[in-house]
Amino acid sequence: MGQIVLKKVQKKFDDVEVIPPLDLTIEDGEFTVFVGPSGCGKSTLLRLIAGLEDVTAGSIEIDGKEAADLPPAKRGLSMVFQSYALYPHMSVRKNIAFPLKMAKMDSAEIKKRVEAAAEVLNLTSYLDRRPGQLSGGQRQRVAIGRSIVREPSAFLFDEPLSNLDAALRVGMRMEISELHKRLDTTMVYVTHDQVEAMTMADKIVVLQAGVVEQVGSPLDLYHSPKNKFVAGFIGSPKMNLIEGDEAKKHNAQTIGIRPEHIAVADGNGEWSGVVGVSEHLGSDTFFHVHDTGLADMITVRVEGDVGLKYGDKINLSPRQDLIHKFDQQGDRIV
Amino acid sequence: MAPAVFLLLVWMLVPLITTLFFSFKKYLPLRGDELGKGLDWVGFENYSRFLNSSSFWPSVQTTLLIVGSVLVITVVLGVLLALLLDQPMWGQGIVRILIISPFFVMPTVSALVWKNMFMDSNYGLFAHLWRFFGAEPVQWLSQSSIESIIMIVSWQWLPFATLILLTAIQSLDSEQLEASEMDGAPVLKRFWYIILPHLGRAITVVILIQTIFLLAVFAEIFVTTGGAFGSRTLTYLIFQRVLESQNVGLGSAGGVYAIILANIVALFLMRIVGKNLDQ
Ligand SMILES: Nc1ncnc2c1ncn2[C@@H]1O[C@H](COP(=O)(O)OP(=O)(O)OP(=O)(O)O)[C@@H](O)[C@H]1O
Ligand SMILES: [Mg+2]
């Protein structure tokens, strides 16, 4: 249970078309991530599914039933908001129990479910606190608790981790992934952080200006991006995109090569340039190489530490089999 | 800091001490008592006379009735109006200014307007309305004097309540409402479980501030009923004792009772709603 199918879904705010007609299928039990730059319509799409915004046209089917005209509560979905949206005047227990109370469940059953959820989320000792007395991570867990007690057919998350610090974010990322494995329920997750997308998703939906650019597994998107936009968006650091003569050699308008697919050559590499800033991460080093005559800057990833300094000359050899080619329209050439 | 405290002390203490001083003296200016000649000490006689006068308890009752009713009316209507004004609508700015405007009309003026324009039993608007439906016009100020005063005072204070409550509603995080909507709460439950608790603090502030001013309502009564027909509040009774009966001592004793009443009411209110303030 928990298949969501969008057919020709369109959304306009007044006259501004934020989402042009869009088709998308989210399979039951899948962890789907919407990624895209800020303002591309990820939240809007999620809110359309949730029912917090009305579709301008098109249909939304949840488990085979038309849902576009149903109010949010009737869609059997639950949502975790970026601001957590906890009820500040209620204790953690009451917050988690709220959807059950609204469903008029009897109090013994409510108690059982709330305590079970608290157990799963390590909240047992905080049940009688108010949200204001919790840390960001704990609040996040309460919000998740509130959404799981109802046993929805799908969970919707809108950038749930963006208010947390980096370390906590990694931790919560794991917890949500684990929760997904355990509950085996459909999850739709919005983020603009492509690392989150890559690590958590079964399926990634890349959006740009309301248009689905590509749908696929994280590795699909990494290995065969459908166009320049996806190529540049997925992967960190970003893929190097090169135009001009070098691209012409490959019969393409643009070629792309990921920083990890360029090796530093000892003697005469195919390309050469001057080392600019280098970012040392310990395990890896990222060099920003200038004056290659290819693009303003080429990023190169090298494992470990190579004794190159600012201003040193560097020779590069890209792996020919891993060069991506794009045509005039920016689409992939196969 | 120090000068401010000193100024405040003088500001408050001087009238308080004069009142206390007079309340223990016989001071009837029309009977020849004069400050310069010294006043007779009468102990607690003024206090017992004020307390035992047949008008004392009714006046306390009237005071509490007016304060209580106005509080209920302004808070309930204020919440409803604030909810309405929070909705996006055409001409929002103008509507809001119109709603707020009664607050800028002086109490005396608004009471006069109500008395002559609406409540007059011959040519008032209400009389016309009643006649239009074939009913006998109500003699507002004599037959339902307290209700009339409650109506006038509520009209004056409604803008204040609405304004404070509107700002409170506007500060509610819309994601909380959306979350509760997804949690399956219909409109009325969203109001009850989310909006109303959020308004708790603002309602408390409205109640406390209004109480302070409502206990001292005067002009509205002076202009309309002149304290007749059971509309005499404690404040008004004190005014009558001092100015109409020219008994300063007795009036001062009444003033001290008014202070006590205000403190009881304040204590009572703090017990009920005060806990909303410390969150
Ligand atoms: N209620 C609204 N009225 C008008 N325009 C809106 C409304 N909500 C969103 N938009 C517009 O729709 C577009 C998409 O917004 P949306 O919030 O979906 O972006 P997003 O992808 O979630 O971005 P972010 O990553 O910054 O959260 C934006 O250009 C935004 O200005
Ligand atoms: Mg968003």
Image (cartoon, coloured by chain):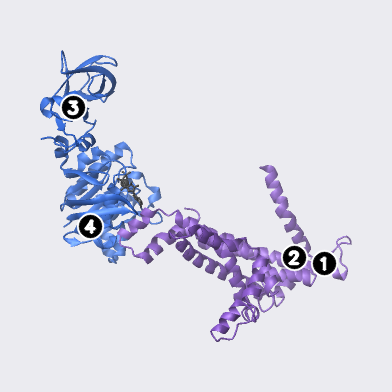
Chain colours: A blue, B purple
**Are the residues at dot 1 and dot 2 in contact (C-beta closer than 8 Å)?**
yes
- Judged by depth in the image, the label closer to the viewer, 3 or 4, is 4
**Are the residues at dot 3 and dot 4 in contact (C-beta closer than 8 Å)?**
no
Label 2 element class = helix
Q: Is residue B93 visible?
A: yes
- Judged by depth in the image, the label closer to the viewer, 3 or 2, is 3
Mark 3 surroundings within 10 Å by alpha-carbon count, few (fewer than 14), some (14 through 19), many (20 or more): some
Residue B87 point in image, percent of width and height? 43, 60
* Vertical position of residue A180 compared to residue B253: above or below: above
Marks 4 and 1 share the same chain: no
Mark 1 surroundings within 10 Å by alpha-carbon count, few (fewer than 14), some (14 through 19), many (20 or more): many
Q: Which mark is residue A58?
A: 4
Viewer-proximal residue among A306 and A217: A217
Indicate the chain on which mark 3 is placed. A
Mark 4 surroundings within 10 Å by alpha-carbon count, few (fewer than 14), some (14 through 19), many (20 or more): some
The span from disc 4 to disc 1 (Cα, nearest Å) is 86 Å
The span from disc 3 to disc 2 (Cα, nearest Å) is 91 Å
Q: Amino acid at mark 1?
A: Tyr
Q: Residue at x 33, y 41 (%)?
A: A164
Q: Earlier in the sequence, mark 3 or mark 4?
A: 4
Residue corresponding to mark 2? B252
Query: On the picture, is B188 further left or further right than A318?
Result: right
